[in-house]
Image (spheres, rainbow, N blue to C red):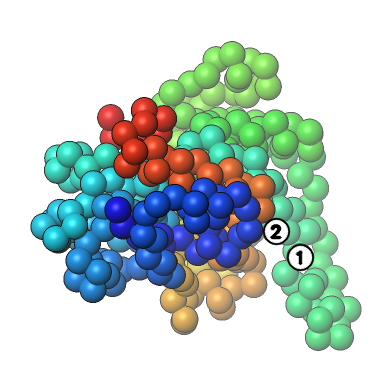
Amino acid sequence: MRILLTTTSYQDTPGKHHDLLDNCSHEIVRARGPLTETEMINLVEQYGGFDGLLNGDDEITSTYIDVALNAPTPLKVISKYGIGLDSIDVDYATYKKIPVLFTPGVNHTTVAEHTIGLMIALSKHFWIHMNACKHGEWTRVTGNELCGKTIGIMGLGRVGKALTERVRAFGMNVIGYDLYWDNEFANMHNIKRAQSFDEICTNADVISLHMNLSDETRNLINAESIAKMKDGVMIVNTARGGIVVDQDIADACKRGKVSGYGTDVMTHEPMEKNHIFREVDNIIMTPHVGSRTSESVQRQAVRATKNILNYLAGVEDFIQANV
């Protein structure tokens, strides 16, 4: 069979996932994603289709799925390298009886650590200080401690829980919001449950985003919600770029309503060349590398590889998102 591999961190990181793929009997076609719908369709036309996708954040649209299903080699399975499924039209794939496999539980540790890194960088003004030192200057801006501050965690899934454990070690107070509340975990870590997003806005010194991108969460952080937040609030986003309105975040950072915004994700990736965030010193960005550590990549890649190989072999050992 023929498999299309598009995820770059998979390809660029050494590990036993390469052995799994190299030793299988399938033809492997490699491309450098994330790919647009047009680029994905062009590959189908070039190769005559693929039995399976081992993909990252490529645009898997309904149009692409139709083209892939009608190719000489029709699509049988989508194996997402990761847990975020917003780049895949899962509903349409389900309608067309295409299983979407994914890899939950593999990257929460490294994403939580990355979130902490962004929080420290913002509170200690790392960008201003490092940029000054690199240019031979001795600019010093007074920072703030995290200890004693209240963090509002939006989404208490695996990443939110891993972050909770770490910020409690910093001496932070935690309030959380999640539709699926884990009372046992909350009681163990002294998490106050917020009844609404507004309650997070009005009480948190730091807001950390850990939700899926959906119709309910898209543009959640906007001018209206920012107005309800504490003056000088810090916002960290290691979830999805579409949860925030970029212009509203930039405006709030410029006037000091938001003391800093740290993000690992953008609405459009790679980042647009002239993006407004580049003009704002108290906005720091990393290029969607929160889950890109050697340890996490290998866990994620091995699981995604086993998912697709087992499915194509008829082995009931894979994790499916659209059951």
Tell me where residue 159 appears, x and y as whole percent.
57, 38
- In this view of the protein, can residue 319 be seen by the observer? no
Q: Is residue 64 left or right of residue 100?
A: left
Residue contact between numbered discs 2 and 1, judged by CB atoms under 8 Å? yes
Asked whether 218 or 69 is in front, the reply is 69
Q: Position of 309 compared to 143: left or right? A: left
Vertical position of residue 213 compared to residue 9: above or below: above
Residue 61, label in figure = none
What residue is rendered at 65% in x and 40% in y?
A: 109
Disc 1 residue type (three-letter): Phe
* Residue occupying image coordinates x 85% and y 71%: 140
Residue sitting at x 51%, y 27% = 194
In the image, residue 48 lies at what x, y percent? 20, 66
Identify the amino acid type marked 2. Leu
Q: Which residue is mark 2?
A: 122
- Element assignment for label 2: helix
